[in-house]
Image (cartoon, rainbow, N blue to C red):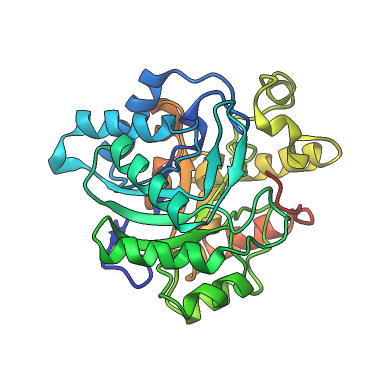
Amino acid sequence: MKMRKLGNTDFEITPVGFGTWAIGGEWVYGWGPQDDADSVAAIVRAVNLGINWIDTAAAYGLGHSEEICARAFNELGSSRKPYIFTKCSLVWDSEGRIGHSLRSDSIRREAEASLRRLKVDAIDLYQIHWPSFPPGNPDDPDIEEGWSTLAELQKEGKVRHIGVSNFSVAQLKRIHRLAPVSSLQPPYSMLMRGIEDEILPFCEANNIGVIVYSPMHNGLLSGSMTRERVQNLPENDWRRRNPAFIEPALTKNLEVAEVLKAIGVRHGRTAGEVAIAWTLRLSAVTGAIVGGRSPKQVEGFAGALEFRLTPEEIDEIDAVLPAPLPFQV
């Protein structure tokens, strides 16, 4: 398997990483009920299949995903522990209401809490989760303060490298002059292609690694999603509010998934592996974050570690893609 250097870091990472958003359990941006034993088993299976980095966040399940990661790392043992990437800036109150802070004291509290939950001495990659929240709000005025705090944590040895998630080029420029940005984590899939024109070229020119999330568009392009399954998503599954899962977009998106299935059949791959490979076709994309809620789901996408599309297959896919939807959370 060909490894990829992550931006200006010394990390050589696999093309696919394991994402833990969906294993956080039930919270305001959750994916419905989740069995913790399945979550631990999914992480262990991912590492056993060769994946060497895990992406999580303090907010996923209000700390729960980080705790699940620690359980999985304990099962794996110190010699097989993957890189751990986590995030800050989304905070919550006693009622589980999500807020946002990039103040230095808040980030330091978050970092210490993440270190405790993950049971590690240092976080391999610490990222600002959002520049503002909810998405679309004006920029948080404390972006520079937050980024400077991450740089201080790096100097102190509490985090090894620092990056951001969901930042625009303008926001990247604001912080890059204070301390180099190691990585950016943006959403990217066949249905959400807004990073192609400006963000990817900027990152490539400035040696910023790009680890994209939702390459299967939250499971919609996995090949296992059906109209019936969408209709039966739990009421507390955030995808029920996602425009891609609602008509008139749903029908077209499921048709795209059928094309991916057909291409996958030629290679003995799943539609999801085709969707992931499509995001990895660009040199500016270092890796793709893919979530799994069980070992079986991990086995359904692990082939994307090495599978790549031909130029003809990329053209075949591009010919059927709808106009991309705006990012929604």
Picture layout, residue 255 above or below residue 7: above
Q: Nearer the viewer, residue 174 or 39?
A: 174
Instruction: Identify the residue at horizontal 63%, vertical 60% (top origin).
Output: 140
Q: Is residue 232 left or right of residue 207?
A: right
Outermost residue, left side: 79
Which image quarter holds the N terminus? bottom left
The image position of residue 170, as x and y in percent, is 63, 74
Q: Between residues 187 and 154, which one lies in front from this camera angle?
A: 154
Task: Please identify the quarter of the rendering in which residue 182 is found.
Answer: bottom left
Q: Front-most of 143 and 192?
A: 143
Find residue 169 and report its image quarter. bottom right
Q: How many marks?
A: 0
- Relative height, residue 37 to residue 182 (above, below): above
11 sits left or right of 202 in the view? left
Residue 249, relative to residue 130: is it above or below? Answer: above
Coordinates of residue 257 in the picture (x, y in percent): 66, 41
Relative image position of residue 206 (x, y in whole percent): 46, 80
Q: Is residue 24 left or right of residue 306?
A: right
